[in-house]
Amino acid sequence: MNSVEARILRIECGLIPFTTPSDVFQAGGHEKGVPSQTLLDRMRYYKVPGVSLAVVQKDEIEWAKAYGVQNIEEKNPVTTATLFEAASSTKLLTATIALHLVEKGLLDLDSDINGFLNSWKVPESKYSEGQKVTLRFLLTHQAGINRPEGGFSWEEGSVPSLVQVLNGESPAQNHPVKLEFVPGSKWQYSNLGYVIIQMLIEDVLGRSFAEFAKEWVFEPLGMVSSRMDMPARAEFVAAALPHDAEGVVHEQRLFPTAVAHAGLLTTPKDFAIFMVELMKSYRGRSNQILSQAMARQMFRVELELDPAILGVSLGQGLGVFLYPESNNLLFLHPGGNDPGANCWPIAAPDLGNAAVIMTNGAKGEILGMEILTAIMREYHWLEEL
């Protein structure tokens, strides 16, 4: 058994049940005497049928491995090529694309976005009289936009346009965009805010967001398994289906047009390639996606978040969460789609270390944190930080 195989085995056998979300940043601080459990044990406990993950060391994918099944009823195995929903981790990609367009001079971080929008405008209200919605506020969830409550749905057999989604008009079945407070006055996580960013990008480019993501990110970086266009039902044979908290399988139901908030289908290996590129940009080793200056701006704390919101002290960057309580930065953006898909990407750009964990179960977010803690403990990440 080589050193990498030994490490994988120790991680697989070294999961410790979580107490709080902050445990993920205290990889060596678990209570003594708590017995570790195996990854398969924890998958059964959380009723998560499938897991896929990739680990990066010094800007290289050191290993990737998959566990379990795509569909609990059909028992088709998960492989490292199986597609998973990135869910809200998609926002990291969306933010990167938006910042690229800022560098190109096509967008501005601090101007009224209504000056760039053509197909739709942010509704005026008493909250926008003194302060307008900007791209910076959208990226950092400070724009005053509603979430929306109840999420996104649409009439069966229909394909709502982005304008219909933003207006909450049939065949879209979500609440419309509205301002709930003065932009810049407080933090409120909003999926609709990222649909507005998609509309902004499509208006500026005159083309679909999914097409541009494929041309500018996926193809140049060799992310051959990534897509943001809704695949046909027959193509889902290669995708892990979502499972709810009781382990019941559901059909894939990604929104057909509004994709910038949570619509990426990918693999941990592909997402890890993207993370490596961001880390290199941060250190000035690559400018294929962003310049070093823009990457540094992206990973700068715009505001500190209330620990009561997420259960851990994090900072909000431009489309990314930051863990600044260390000598070296950690950036992350976990995601979860109902009824049961989760993604956990995290990276230490100064060190070139990263991990991406994806699951197809509702409780996969907790499981992902337990796996991540085992990885960080095995690789001594926090000691290096």
Image: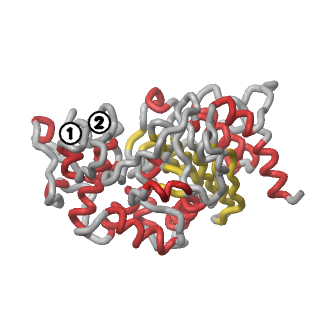
Give above or below for 200 relative to 185.
Answer: below
Answer whether residue 75 is visible to the viewer in this image: yes
Q: Which element carries disc 2, helix, strand or loop?
A: loop
* Residue located at (30% from left, 71% from top): 104
Give how far apart the Cα atoms at labels 2 and 1 are. 8 Å
Q: Are marks 2 and 1 in contact (CB under 8 Å)?
A: yes
Answer whether residue 297 is visible to the viewer in this image: no
Residue at the disc numbered 1: 176
Give above or below for 60 relative to 77.
Answer: below
- The residue type indicated by label 1 comes to Pro
* Residue located at (33% from left, 68% from top): 103
Which numbered dot is residue 87?
Answer: none
Which numbered dot is residue 148?
Answer: 2
> Where is residue 243 shown, x and y percent of the image?
54, 37
> Where is residue 340 shown, x and y percent of the image?
51, 38
Instruction: Please give left or right for residue 277 compared with residue 57 in the image.
Output: left
Instruction: Please give left or right for residue 116 compared with residue 31 in the image.
Output: left
- The residue type indicated by label 2 comes to Pro
Q: Which element carries disc 1, helix, strand or loop?
A: loop
